[in-house]
Amino acid sequence: MKRVAITGVGAVTPLGNDADSTWEGLATGRSGVGPLTTFDASGFPVRIAAQVKDFDAAAAIPAKVGRKHLSRVGQFGVAAAWEAVRSAGIDELSEDVYAADERGVAMGASVGRPELQALLDIGHLRATTGRADAFICQPPALTLTDDQNVPLAAMARMVGGTGPMLGISTACAGSGHAIGEAYRAIQEGDAKLMIAGGYDSLTTWLDLLGFSLLGALTDQYNDDPEHASRPFDADRSGFVVGEGAVAVILEDMDAARERGATILAEVLGYSSTLNAYRITDSPPDGSGAIQAMEGAIAESGLGTGGIDYVVAHGTSTHGNDQSETTAIKKVFGAEAQRLVVSAPKSMAGHLTSASLGLGVLAAVNAMQHSLVPPTLNLDRPDRGLDLDYVPNTARSMPVSAVLINAFAFGGSNTSIVVGAPQEEA
């Protein structure tokens, strides 16, 4: 099997509109949660979110890539991908480096859908005027704007790619599956370069209402948003919805070194499982998550003793935090007490399809800077949640290998292991 390198990272998140500012936010424990701005939420039980701020698509996405048919969240994804492409030095690739059919894209995202408000407006128009053409009064271009594949096509154009293109919608596991399947494509020789990651924004009134009715969101911190996301804390009461995008560049290790690329990290293992339990709940015994972590660690060849840091899914819901802690203890056994575990969602909120991508960004930087970002707002650990979650303050320590988790609605799980690049396999 071919080895797979990470050579570029890009991000648009509630902590910043590029990878460096996102990492700075994670490393310093800065919260990106604030009042919701996408609609008037004054009558809603939840009025906060972790949102992208001051994003300028015209500055972030060059005209040659194309912005015309990108939705707001599609712009996040394409901007993150463009930053990753430039950071990897592949914005001007020639056929001598990689053939067009050796370059591809794999991204996790929610399935494109029309804005519910637009549909309500159309229905109201028909009901009040009786116009038979009410359903065709919207511009045809909106069909493209709502299409999940349009941002992926823009990403493919960035690198002149005609190879594999995968748009994956598996909720919170989306970017995990995308990065994992891109890794597999390179391992197996189907591609030599892949843009991979995820982008998402579930901050419409329908999203907030749906998650609120499920009881998944915290409604206790509307007046104190920075303290709302508190994974593993006894006072946690639900997750904070977020938005944004993270993209990484994966390359065939030998080919990347031959072209003189800077190797940031290496993907060492990937596993995907299904709980077959409940749609919204994690199994109390950690099943599904256990198998995903075990599979990724086994493929890495490191064993549990070789993992220094776990980037937790860590949503700040009672069930997920308990289930993930139970799973980590079962996978690592006696090793669990020496691990460090932290949750980026405590600062960035839940980026849903982009969440594991954010974990990869955290892992790569933790290895490069010998610094593990904290779990923010962890003031009073809950009973039984007794791992080292790096409460509130980042920790300086050497990091050579990281396990990253994403566990989604519907029971879909992914775990990925990344490590510092080694000269020898």
Image (spheres, helix red, strand yellow):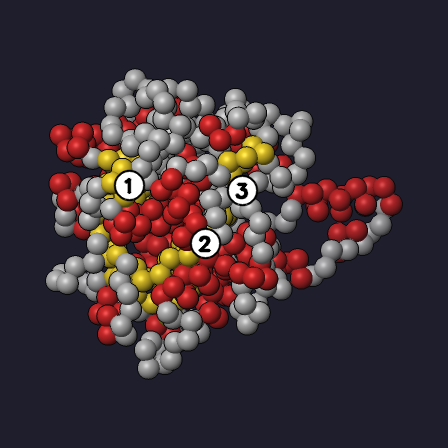
Q: What percent of the width, then of the height, locates residue 6?
A: 30, 59
Q: Indicate the quadrant containing the N terminus: top left, top right, bottom left or bottom right.
A: bottom left
The label nearer to you, 1 versus 3, is 1
- Front-most of residues 117 and 74: 74
- Front-most of residues 222 and 255: 222
- Front-most of residues 20 and 268: 20
Q: Residue, x 48% and y 28% (percent of image)?
A: 228
Of the image marks 1 and 2, the number of the one nearer the N terminus: 2
Q: Left or right of 210: which side holds 316? A: left
- Front-most of residues 3 and 137: 3
**Amino acid type at mark 1:** Val
Which quarter of the figure has residue 355?
top left
Which residue has dot 1 on it?
372
Per the image, label 1 sits on a secondary structure element best described as strand
**Disc 1 to disc 3, how far (Cα)?**
23 Å
Crowding at label 1, few (<14), some or many (≥20) Cα neighbours within 10 Å? many
Q: Residue, x 32% and y 53% (percent of image)?
A: 180
Which residue has dot 3 on it?
51
Q: Which mark is residue 402?
A: none
**Disc 3 to disc 2, how far (Cα)?**
14 Å
Q: Indicate the quadrant containing the C terminus: top left, top right, bottom left or bottom right.
A: bottom left
**Amino acid type at mark 3:** Gln
Q: What percent of the width, then of the height, locates residue 248?
A: 37, 58
Q: What percent of the width, then of the height, locates residue 361?
A: 35, 50
Which residue has dot 2 on it?
18
Q: Residue, x 42% and y 71% (percent of image)?
A: 91
Crowding at label 3, few (<14), some or many (≥20) Cα neighbours within 10 Å? many
Of the image marks 1 and 3, the number of the one nearer the N terminus: 3
